[in-house]
Amino acid sequence: MLTLLGALVLATGICNAQRGQLYAGASKSDITPDEASLPKTSQGILDHCFARAIVFTNGITKAAFVTMDAAMSNNRMVAAVNERAAKELGIPEGNILYNWTHTHSGSSVFGDELNERVFQALKEANGRLVPAKVGYGNGVCYLNVKRDLFDPERGTWWEGPDYDGKSDKTVAVIYFESLEGKPIATYFNYAMHAVITGNTDKVSADFPGEAETYVESRYGDDFVACFASGAAGDQNPLYFQQTFDLRDIRIKDYAERGEDISNAMPPGGQGLDRTKPEVQRLLGEQERMIRSYGQILGEEVKYVIMMMRRFETDVTLKCLHKTVTCPARRQLNGGGRAGYEGQYEDAGEATIDLHLTMLDDIPVVGTSGEPYNPIAVELKQKSPYARTMLTTLCQGTFTGYIPDDESYGAQSFEVLGSRFKQGYAQKAIVDGALDLIHEATH
């Protein structure tokens, strides 16, 4: 609990920044590739992927959120779009927080075409700026589960639902609407890997895309819903059995050909006979499952918005970024996906990019890697602002899995493959984010 003096210090820090009337606008652009351009192993397009943008300003500073329905970061796209946004839209370089939803089945157009479509989403959002107000709320959703598990049947570590593991169920929601009450956009954060449709070999935005379009359908054609992946490095969907069953089928098919992939990630587009009724049933269940997940998560987002009572119209706005460094390691052995003792050597330093968008008393922290869930929980507990959220896979760089210090004893694939030495990255992220928040408000 804050003391009176502490509260006064915080209030003073916020008040020292310049306030101004909030303006906000939003748009989206389809980035799905043409079906003819997909690889031969692709089974086509299940649903479309989008770049979504929310632009906002207080008349002094202009910033934006950009969410990509795609798997991996793209620093060349970020650099190209940043340069144009600064020149043509007046959004300073460094003031756009990019994040990838990390859908494992996503795909997009490439190169200049992708850059153009993302920029057009920003340009249209910028052209729709209207006087606005912003609200924030937290909800809960019980769809995620810790995925690092010691499997007694296998007698080793494996990927599976650890029902007793640490798992933050928070759905954090930022919501923009016009002064007249017309919905503009929402930016919502939840920690869960988008891996449900990975085995379908179809282009899909997975459950984040379903949640985004489900929320958008509630508020109108111009409304934009941006999914921001929380600290999901160790978080899977709770209902995931289809994936495990399909994995076992692939393992068996490969074994019949004399290849053991029982402790490896089965390659996509191979090893599944899609004419088999059981395979068809499981793949169909995966396609239906993302709609179920999207609807449930979307319902919670809508409920949080409905329950918002406090809105701000005159806001402060500041964007900061920094790079933190940690001792790195290099793995010397590769015993499979999980369940073996890793061997390492020192490998200099590894970097983690941190970004802060401080929208009034809402700190949105972005990080370039895939941190474990307890890292976000610690940041939120230590932050002087109750509305703090941590968004991952940001800003175009990718630094891999970042386990929390306690999880380094697990022989899981994320821990074994992490390039960060134990005892450094968690502190670097939390302390670095707190430093940015302090700088932005003092």
Image (cartoon, rainbow, N blue to C red):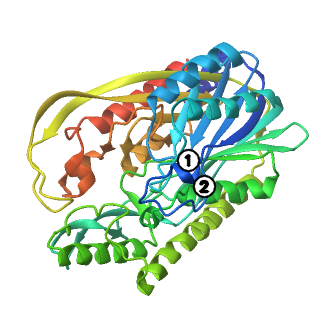
Disc 2 secondary structure class: helix
**Relative height, residue 384 to residue 45 (above, below):** above
Q: Which residue is drawn at 65% across and 17% down?
A: 17
Q: What residue type is labelled 2?
A: Gly
Q: Residue at x 47, y 22 (%)?
A: 321
Q: Is residue 146 visible?
A: yes
The residue that disc 1 covers is: 69
The residue that disc 2 covers is: 209
144 or 225, which lies in front?
A: 225
Q: Check the picture and name the quadrant holding the C terminus.
A: top right
7 or 363, which lies in front?
A: 363
Query: Within 10 angstroms of label 1, few (less than 14), some, or many (20 or more) residues?
Result: many
Rendering coords of residue 161 (x, y %): 36, 70
Q: Residue at x 54, y 22 (%)?
A: 80
Query: Within 10 angstroms of label 2, few (less than 14), some, or many (20 or more) residues?
Result: many
Rendering coords of residue 71 (x, y %): 46, 47
Q: First in sequence: mark 1 or mark 2?
A: 1
Q: Can residue 361 be seen in this view?
A: no
Rendering coords of residue 231 (x, y %): 43, 48
Rendering coords of residue 320 (x, y %): 52, 21
